[in-house]
Image (spheres, rainbow, N blue to C red):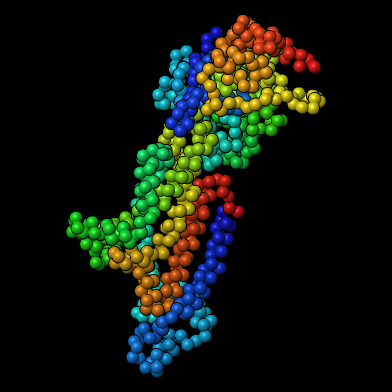
Amino acid sequence: MSNLLEINNLSIDVKIEKSYYNIVNRLSLSIAKKQKYGIVGESGSGKSLTSVAIMNLLADSLSVSEGQILFEETQELTTLSNKEMMKIRGKDISIIFQEPMTALDPIFTIEYQISEVLKIHFNHSKKEMREMIISILKDVGIPRPESIMKSYPHELSGGMRQRVVIAMALICKPKLLIADEPTTALDVTIQAQILELMNELTEKYDTSILMITHDLGVINETCERVAVMYAGEVVEESSVDSLFSHPKHPYTQGLLKSIHTLGDRSEKLYSIPGNVPTPTQLKKHGCRFASRCPHVMDLCKEETPPYVEVSEDQVSKCWLHTERGEYNEQGQKASVASEEYEKTFSD
Amino acid sequence: MLTYITRRILMLIPVLFGVSVFIFIVMRIVPGDLAMTILGNNATPESLHQLREDFGLNLPLYVQYFNWMSGVLTGDFGQSMRTGQEVLPDILSRFKLTFELTLISAFISWIIAIPLGIIAAVKRNTNTDFGVRLISLLGVSVPNFALAIIIILVLSLAFSYSPPIEYVGFFENPLQNLEIMIIPAIVLGSSMAGAVMRMTRSSVLEILRQDFIRTIRAKGARERIVIFNHALRNAMIPILTIIGLQVGTLLGGTVIIEQIFSLPGLGQLVLTAINQRDFIVVQGAVLFIAFVFVFINLLVDVLYSYLDPRIKYK
């Protein structure tokens, strides 16, 4: 299976008052054709930045300092000129942003805004465009598309607007759809509908998805593979099934533990202590999760852990999986981590 | 929309009524006697009394107001107490000049201010941006008369230019007319440009930070489309507000600039009339200016709803 998108060792730096701080560190992942790939992590973990970097739309203060983003194995997106990139944006790769309320230009009609994408990339007649727009609006479940397309964004609800944004992103039948927290701003009842819609349509159009979210539930519902990001690094990469049945990295375990399930009557919700370190707090060496890790060893603070293939389809970046991390400072066997996790979950 | 415009026009009535009462009273409170200024200090009490009687100045104030108003409402603004000329045709002919001057200055201001404002916003915090901001600061803070004098000085020293003495109407001799108008228009235009530039910069900058701009870029749109089709159109409302106020003010005449360039505009008319205590002319002109100002504002409000579909008037 050939890869549609391959990110190799991507690092992104932010410039704060003339010095550069690393915020995405040597991130690698690859998305196959028609695959549904997820990136999950807390806010500030660099997941949205990665998506913006793929579109080559990073803000002025941000820059890619190393690595490649290969699209369809031939095009290197980080070095493409803006002109060439414009041909890809909206046509081959499109993106859905988090906030449907502000993602649309308030002074143009829905029809104008969807037709704009078509005008940029194709030469359809007015009538053809109209028909395409009506059909895509029907596809995204908008009732009475003929009249809705004449309305302005402020006349639609949040759910409807997100449907319009999805229609806009899919009308050129892109090869990759990046969805950056597409449901976070929506009502819970609408969330499931939108996810289902995205699943359905991307299958219909043979589009791959890169789903960016902080919500493991969303990953579980939509994705096949997932990368867990922490402080700008992928800490675990695996198939969704493996991740949920046997998470290996202590951070992933913490994330899964902090999911609140319906009917859970325990008094206190679990949360990982501490906060994601800010770019200025990050150290050059050592594990970035060390300060919050329940299994932290001296080793973790000094040396950067390697990626370890923990099972057939699962990679985790942690010392615990290596011989050097077999025993922690209390002399306990380190693989306890995983057992302990399973114990808490079975309770 | 039509009902909204009708209602706004109806609202003009109380505003203009208020203005008319105000200016009527003010003109009668200010010290200085019309009869005295006409007849001079040596006039006999009898002749002064006679003149006041002729102008109806001895009648009770409300009767005077009523007489004036009933004339105005039928389109008769009365005659100048000094020259005996009809007031309204005089106002209109001077308004032609003021109108032309306003149009040219506004045009000059926009072609300078809007592109520079956009450039400053797009290249924010670069030297270009600082340059533009400095220019706009100068435009806002250098007084018109100073700029006018500097320009005349430079032109006369370098090109032995002198401001034309005689005004020529546009339809009599367009070229000569433009020659007269261009310098005052540049002076007025550059001071208008400062404010418009600042507003364009900050307003475009704010729009460029909005989420939907990122969406448009993600569609693959060229930067030109992003800026002109989306950012500028969205940024137009505050810019239009400033422009409306400026144009409204300019249409009321610019006393100082008209004086410096000896242009017979509305401002000069009002100034002369005030000096001569020519009540009828002042009242008529002020009422006219107020009408124009309110009308321009109405026009701006109507344009808002054209620019932004979220603004709906009922």
Residue placed at 40% from the left, 62% from the top? B251
Q: Quadrant of the C terminus of chain A?
A: top right
Residue placed at 37% from the left, 64% from the top? B254
Residue placed at 44% from the left, 38% from the top? B227
Q: Quadrant of the N terminus of chain A?
A: top right
x then y, percent, for residue A249? 64, 14
x then y, percent, for residue B274? 39, 75
| A345 or A55: nearer the viewer | A345
x then y, percent, for residue A70? 47, 16
x then y, percent, for residue A140? 62, 28
B63 displayed left or right of B42: right
Image quarter of residue A194: top right
> Number of callouts in the render?
0
Image position of A305 with respect to B56: above or below: above
| B209 or A210: nearer the viewer | B209
* The residue positioned farthest toward the front in the image shown: A330
| B308 or B41: nearer the viewer | B41
Residue placed at 35% from the left, 91% from the top? B43
Image position of B9 with respect to B205: above or below: below
Image position of B240 with respect to B89: above or below: above
